Amino acid sequence: MSPADSRFAGPIPKDAFKPTKSDHSLEVGIIGAGIAGLGAAVALRSSGHKVEIFERSRFKNEVGAAINVCPNAARPLHHYGFDFQRSKAVAVRRVGFRKIDSIMSTEFHLESEFMKADSLDTIMAADFHGLPEKFGANYYFMHRVDLHTELRRLAEEPDGYTEPVRISLSSEVTDVNIDSGELTLKDGSKHKKDVVVAADGIHSFLTAKVIGSDNSAHPTGQSAFRFLIPTEKLLKDPETRDLIEGRPDGIYVGSGPDRRLDNAHKSQDQGQGGAQAIEDGAALGALLSKLRSVEEVPARLRLFERVRKNRASAMQIFSNVGQDQAEKNQAKAQQYVDGPVPSKTPVT
């Protein structure tokens, strides 16, 4: 691959944001111990800050099913030492569509062709080879719980040079003074922090306090009921055996005649909800590194907004359509992108 084909700046040195004795360490409070909260905690810890997460539930465990970890999320995770093997991640090489008894499937697995079941003709296959060379990391699928567990390990496990993240459970934050950085918990206790990160989900009460207006999530008219069935059980059932037996490992997404098989994500059709949260945390950790005093924080946070606002806005616009329909929102996204906007997924 020629240098012109490379689309990322190259590997980031492992110690790029490692603190030195002259760096100022912040007291950081993070509200929420989900993927966004833990991702930010890992990044800020690696820059030498003292991080405490306030989680309202009793258990610091993620729930859910599968999640995409795209190259833009996998690359910073690699930097922080995320173990993709331990988290049972599966690298994607090709994506395509196959017709199976009037149900359209999407298949993700290694070195696969995607064909009509009756004729073996390929309907579509997007080639994901070469992603590490182009974007610095692979495209992975993993279980959300495994992603959460590995992030928690990176947050809490001693590393010899930074202070492990403290996760306070049953600690519901009821108010935050955005001028002083003081958090008030449900039990009445107060905690003063230099920086407060709101990572408590789409129903966060802090959004309005920060931006000065309500920005509530609105129903899309789509919903999903997700559940897990062991492969062994599918193989024993004569009605599902033929769909599973002899096929390579993959993900099959069925699109049926009614709404019961539709799916929805916060970043609805790009699989970028978790990825953008991980990007946010990585950017925050990088931009709050190498501080000389707490007085530098406001300027660094303004820089964070400049870096992240356009990026996240473009991804939200693209998420209004599927990955194979990006051209529909290309013009709308262009105002937030300095450079060419990709039109669609490469197809072979």
Image (cartoon, rainbow, N blue to C red):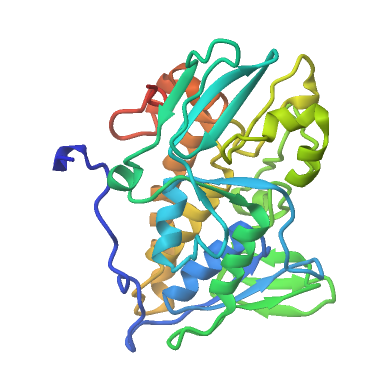
| Residue depicted at 49% across the width and 19% down the height | 325
Q: How many marks?
A: 0
- Where 164 sits versus 178, above or below? below
* 267 relative to 280 in the view: left or right: right
Q: Position of residue 226 (x, y in %)?
A: 77, 40
Judge left or right: residue 339 versus residue 103. Answer: left
Question: Does residue 264 appear anywhere in the picture?
Answer: no
Quadrant of the image containing the C terminus: top left
Left or right of 199 on screen, residue 170: right
The residue shown at (42%, 58%) is 76
Q: 112 or 273: which is nearer to us? A: 112
Frontmost residue, 288 versus 66: 66
Which sits in the foreground, 134 or 128? 128
Q: Position of residue 119 (x, y in %)?
A: 54, 10
User: Is 19 situated above or below 87?
Assistant: below
Residue 10 in which image quadrant: bottom left
Against 11, is 54 above or below?
Answer: below
Q: Residue at x 44, y 66 (%)?
A: 285
Q: Is residue 180 left or right of residue 217?
A: left
Give the percent coordinates (x, y) of residue 144.
65, 53
Q: In the rendering, at what x and y percent does residue 186 appear?
A: 83, 71
In the image shown, does 109 or 280 lie closer to the viewer?
A: 109
User: Residue lying furthest top in this view?
Assistant: 119
Quadrant (top left, top right, bottom left, bottom right) of the N terminus: top left
Q: Is there any visible trace of residue 115 in the rendered image?
A: yes
